[in-house]
Image (cartoon, rainbow, N blue to C red):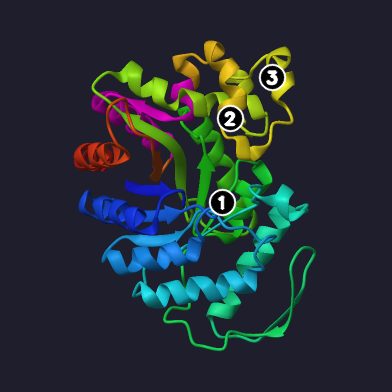
Amino acid sequence: MRLELLMLGDRPAAQLAERARLAEMCGFDAVWVADERFYREVYAVLARLALATRRVELGPCVTDPFSRHPALTAMAIATLDEIADGRAMLGLGAGVSGFAELGIRPTKAPRAMREAVTLVRALWRGERVDVAGEAVSFRGGRLDFAPIRSEIPVHIASNGRLGQRAAGAVADGAIMEACGAAAEAAAFRAEVERGAAAAERHPRAVRLTARLNACIAADGSRARDVVRPSVARYLGRGTLRLATAAAQGLTMPPAATAAMANAPYADGVKPYLPLLPLIGDRHVDALTLAGTKEEVAAHVLALRRAGIDTVMIRPLAGEGAAVADTIAAFGEIWPSIREAAG
């Protein structure tokens, strides 16, 4: 059972490097940096993290094949792999953040991710590539340097069934945001395995990661309150795809969310705060990872039983605490979780 850290580039690079070092000391297996909006440039930050750490794997979670051409991504990841002495990995998704400002309209996202994975792997192998796909084109190009590894792990992030099947077909790992319920984890596993079976791969060839906003506190209810606004945003935006949302009774009444349907992505949680009275603990537990140490450990083990291999946390600071405290708290409980998970 792996533990991974996700950070936004919303802090100075030196501070992000300190958090990465702390995560490494606390036993985390990987550190991801979001390629989101117009925060600090993701690959510059990852290079800084590579120099600040020695063991953890590093990569963007996630970049996309629309705002960055996959050939440029292949180049960036291979360079990061060189700087990090073979610790790079690629997180690829359909993207959305910053698209409005850039005037980007993504099309055929699952196809684009499949084609992007094929292209980056060929470039890492040193091949000259000529591709005219449905979503990705590249004309007779190759990398002008030899990557230190030809097989760098690729993870596809998607909450949609077609994207999850694409991960099953071509990726090393699949990532799902807000996959905090065992029922949703099982549905996630099923879609990835369908994709793997269609591609004649072993059904468990792909590592499944639940990407969760997280907080640990001595008072579990206060930890849940910390992540509750992010849950309001998930449910208020109406764009989070969950196969089991209706069955779990997690959907919001249309009348409650109508006024916030067109809220700008850049506004964060603020437009969705009126939903907070409707967001109960069952909503929080289904979409995040929050509570006391004991509650969080039990929650993780339930996800493990449902088929999740890795938990990736975006740590939030508890009341009167810091993000570093949340990272350290996960480090404290993880050895026992690993042992219990086998």
Q: Which amino acid does label 3 sit on?
A: Thr
* Residue 151 spot, x, y in % from top left: 47, 73
Main SS type for the magenta part? helix
State the quadrant of the C terminus. Answer: top left
For residue 160, above or below residue 63: above
Query: Does residue 249 appear in the picture of this structure?
Result: no
Q: Which amino acid does label 2 sit on?
A: Tyr
Identify the secondary structure beneath mark 3. Answer: helix
The stretch in magenta equals: 284-307
Mark 1 to mark 3: distance in Å? Answer: 24 Å
Question: Mark 1 vs mark 2: which is more N-terminal?
Answer: 1
Of residues 142 and 206, the one drawn nearer to the viewer in this rendering: 142
Q: In this figure, which residue is indicated by the disc labeled 1?
A: 36
Identify the secondary structure beneath mark 2. Answer: helix
Q: Which amino acid does label 1 sit on?
A: Glu
For residue 229, above or below residue 15: above
Query: Does residue 50 appear in the picture of this structure?
Result: yes
Q: In this view, does 55 lie to the left or right of 99?
A: left
Question: Mark 2 vs mark 3: which is more N-terminal?
Answer: 2
296 drawn magenta: yes
Mark 1 to mark 2: distance in Å? Answer: 16 Å
For residue 146, above or below residue 162: below
Around disc 3, counting alpha carbons within 10 Å, would you say few (fewer than 14), some (14 to 19), or many (20 or more)?
some
In the image, farthest residue toward the top: 277
Which mark is drawn over residue 257? 3
* Residue 313 spot, x, y in % from top left: 39, 41
User: Does the CB distance between marks 2 and 3 fall below 8 Å?
Assistant: no
Which mark is drawn over residue 234? 2
